[in-house]
Image (spheres, coloured by chain):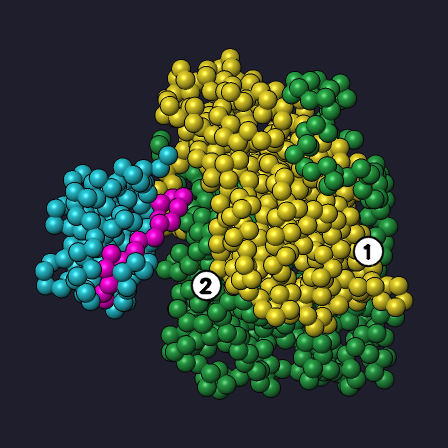
Amino acid sequence: MADKIVKATRHVNQNEGLIFEKSSPGKRGFDLAPLDVPRADPAVALGENHRAEGVTSFPEVSEIEVLRHFTRLSTWNYAIDLGMYPLGSCTMKYNPRVNEFVARLDGIATEHPLQPAELSQGCLKIARLLERCLCEITGMDAVTLQPSAGAQGELTGILLIRAYLKKHGSPRKKVLVPDSAHGTNPATAVIAGYQVENIPSDARGQIDVAKLREQVTEDVAALMVTLPSTLGIFEGRIAEIADILHSKGALLYMDGANMNALAGIARPGDFGADVMHLNLHKTFSTPHGGGGPGAGPVAMKKILEPFRPVPVLVETEEGKLALDDERPDSIGRVRAFFGNFGVLVRALAYILAYGPGIRQATEDAVLNANYIRKHLAGIFDLPYDLPSLHEVVFSDEIQKKNGVNTMDIAKRLIDYGFHPYTTAFPLIVHGALMIEPTESESKEECDLFIEAMRAIAEEAASNPELVRQAPHTTRIGRLDEVTAARKPKLRWSES
Amino acid sequence: MPYPADYRYTKQHEWIHADGGGIAAVGITDFAQKQIGEVVFVGLPKVGDKFKAGQELASVESVKAVFEVFAPASGEIIEVNTALESAPEKVNADPHGEAWFAKLRLSNSEELKELMDADAYEKYCPECEPR
Amino acid sequence: MRYLPKSPAERRQMLDAIGARSIDDLFAGIPERFRLREALKLPGPYSESEVIQYFKERAAESSTGYTSFLGAGVYHHLRSVVTDTIIQRGEFLTSYTPYQAEISQGTLQAIFEFQTLMCQLTGQEVANASMWDGSTATTEAALMAERITGRSRVLVARSLHPEYRKVLETYAENSSLRIEELPFGTDGKVDRQKLDAALGDDVAAVIIQSPNFFGVIEYEPELARQVHSAAALLVVAITEAVSLGAVRPPGEADIVAMEGQSFGLPPSYGGPFVGVLASRMKYVRQMPGRLAGQAADSQGRRGFVLTLAAREQHIRREKATSNICTNQALCALAVTVHLSLLGKEGLRDVAEQNLSKGQFACSELTKVRGVERAFAGPFFNEFTIRLPRTARDVNRELLGYKIIGPLALDAAYPGLANHALVCVTETTTRAQIEGLAAALARILA
């Protein structure tokens, strides 16, 4: 087993309990400067509202224990800084460190969203430049930076459509969603008050245009489409699809999760999308941070501009920037204050670093995905033979003959020093392996990945049990998720 | 696991067992529990809830998915099997017996005649196997 | 380009391996007429120093040099440098959502600790792995109450943060939720008689904030009893989390929706922040968002895993009840580190310092002729004052003293044009408070 694995090896790392388990009364990790005003007696100031006993069981540890605790924990994680995450549609690219630096500058990190606009011109200029860059990249006319995440961006986008259609007579009843779509799409449509109707994919994994023609009636508000699709394949007939919708007064919503295949190459606004969301934590390099924060700005055509959530960034008569809350047609507020501003700063820093050269990043992303595809096709089953863009989807059809499925292969990949690819999605491919390397991977890393996948395919044939029991080299093995769900233990407690 | 002869079965893999006195127990079949995998949670209806045949009556969760359970016939819930709340694994162990979900007072026992009997259901199952 | 690990030779090698003549071949699936012929018109490319230069110039056009008395949902508090040391570690910063538990134990254990801390703070039994912010957490609490009770009316105190109420409205408009606002009385708290009249068997929840938007502590067990007598749920929103270091938590509330920004996250012009949603264990299956649970592997080793995933929308698809996918993991981690550093005594100290500054500021400001406290009652670090002129006018003049004055309330509360919300924290010095008083004395003379 050991000789085939090149990228990773066993290594001693530290054990660590819960922070509460290191606690002991009287320890503390942070001191304050002495109080410079008279001390108020909380019992007097708060009366029966006083929490006299303090927070029960709150940890009490020193600074070094805190630092060691979290440092040790960090060493148990895989990260982009350690190597590739081939996760499909996640776009796990390099998170540039200068972005972290600029987001922390005094004058940016310190600013209060309710302070006067005249003291916020720096922040507002950052927001406006980002809006302009995103319009340019997407080929759209206007942007809102308010949504906190991709899912919220999707909801905002569908609510924009709803508001627009309502203003023009009726919000309509249905939203069409391809069966290859990510689950957030139908969830969003339902939460926006629409019924969801599925559009089947044809034999080539593309939207069945003939069926679409039948299904688009005046009851349909929109089609939600991901481009390229979750199979990494571009809908070649997108212009036709847009026309079908527009001819019936419906709109085209594009899920921008896969924008990493398009930036600098093609613009959704050009091929008929009316509105789309972007994931700044995907295409625009802002860090995933273990699951957030992200941001999901929405770019739109002019017709949807009046409905944008508040506040809207505007230019005053004196040429200054300000935030406007008075928008009669706005769908309202989607969150307090001005969105995940710190994430917006990072995204702009990324765009400025590349400039028009952002095209090169897209080309390298597509190059890497196709290089991997070329070397793994035939070893893994390729259900759809159309050209891949930035990601490729295989299936576990070949390996299943030995009882090895996509989840097993993914777990064995961990022993080879990689994070798994996306398993079991998209749903239209049974036993999917969805691989997106991104442009941040060198040829060396891609070759290591290819070697690892080939080795695992061999193991699946010659020693399936090894794969099925993987991973073998991690601190802990596969966890009993069934018991965790049956008898949930969701917090530490003293007893 | 054999399918009890005096039960009736739906296309969505629920079973119903009438006692002859207008009350029927409902649950999901062995085929269903195999498809679902280890059950971690069962969402049961409340006593007094009324359902038409085909309406969603309960839900079953595995670690990764949720499955709807539909009422095989119309009626009013008169009892739910609260044992499933603390022991959802019974659905895997004894889907036709201990893991009954609820008892209904049937509003129209004729509806059962339209459902499959054990033989028909056994023949139907292989058609439902996923690819 | 420094972020791209390819040499021209390697690109050529890879194209050859694929069998493509040029990179354009790989984009053949995109119709010709949509493929851009020209480069995008974007600023850049910038070197690292130019990126920094751009943002430093923006940072100069800011409030640096001004003293701020703003709170209203975003608070200036001390943060330890240790927090950034930890959250800047690549293994935390650049890791993915912990779906593959075996190689994400660092993130998962930290989430478990976060969930525990939030329970301890709020007095609730379960807390999720975080929401986007306090405003969306409050909205999710309302939706959760609807799912739990099967009822759709939600009574919302007008003393709840105005922006939180607006977010709730946006989400309610497209759902079955019906929001009704309850006015506040002369004490700035929700009018209990109006509440009584509005309660009925179709009310899912009553939402209050405590300390409320005016700074007044609203929660009391009697309020919970009133709400529960109608079999509705009490949701308490908290925007200033530090208050929980000195103020008793709303123990009889059914759901607590809190903003965690005060615990180690900079104001950053409005985000990213971290929402907290905490409730009773019996409601856990109606709770949105991620949850980390304890689990064991086959050798009995303790680990942590995302659990109860069936609630999440990518599994429920059309049947989803919430469309929240992400949590704010790195922000939640910052909060967890910050609170671990503060610990029980540190949190008590910070809270007491805030309380003392609040009392001192109130006393100093109300000594100024013309300045009165509005809305009596216990408060933490925010309180409302009434001025003899509009707060807007006064604030305009305060800017001349390099002071960002207390928030004028007229925009959100048209009847309160002369009112302003003062916030002081442990970062506000005595000199600054005295400076505000002196400036006000001159302006109002």
Taking B17 as reference, is C110 above or below it?
above
Q: Which mark is residue C144?
A: 2
Across and down, in percent, residue C100 comes to 48, 36
Disc 2 sits on a residue from what chain? C
Q: Amino acid at mark 1?
A: Lys
Q: Residue at x 76, y 65 (%)?
A: A323
Residue extending farthest top: A3
Colour of chain B as rendered: cyan
Residue placed most toward the observer, A377 or C256: A377
Please give the range of residues in magenta. Answer: B61-76
State the green chain: C
Task: Decide: few, some or many residues near mark 2? Use Cα within 10 Å; few <14, some 14-19, many ≥20.
Answer: many
Residue that label 1 marks: A125
Q: Colour of chain A?
A: yellow
**Do the residues at pointers 1 and 2 share their chain?**
no
Q: Is residue A419 magenta?
A: no
